[in-house]
Image (tube, grey):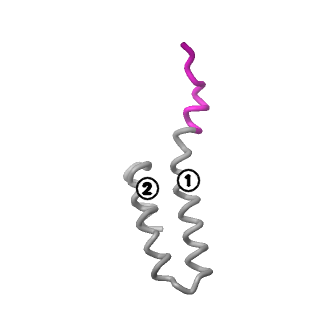
Amino acid sequence: MTYPAPSQRKVTSALPAVATAALATGIFLADIVTPVGEAVAGLYVAVVLMAARFCRPRGVLLVAAG
């Protein structure tokens, strides 16, 4: 039985956090570009919920504050 190298595990565990940051950036850019700000701004809730699933409590606070 083979086990993955420690560096592979770190990359895999960081992937959800990176995906959450990428989604937040995409929503932010869409919020700036589109004239319907209220509809796009509602998607930030999804980012905070993803952060609650994948990040530590301090990370959730930072995402929510951002």
Tell me: residue 64, above or below residue 20: below
Residue 50 badge: 2
Q: What residue type is labelled 1?
A: Ala
Marked residue nearer the N-terminal end (1 or 2): 1
Residue at 55%, 77% in the rendered image: 31
Asked whether residue 10 is drawn in magenta, I would say: yes
Residue 30 or residue 25, whichever sits in front: 30
- Pick the front one: 35 or 22: 35
Circles 1 and 2: CB distance less than 8 Å? yes
| Residue 49 drawn at (x, y percent) | 39, 59
Residue 56 percent location from the top left of the image: 40, 49
Q: Which residue lies furthest to the top in this view?
A: 1
Query: How much space separates mark 1 and mark 2, taking CA atoms?
Result: 9 Å
Q: What element carries label 2?
A: helix
Q: Give the range drawn in magenta.
A: 1-11
Q: Mark 1 points at which residue?
A: 19
Which residue is painted at 50% across and 76% down in the image? 40
Q: Please rate how many residues cluster around mark 1, counting C-alpha atoms within 10 Å: few if below 14, some from 14 to 19, many from 20.
A: some
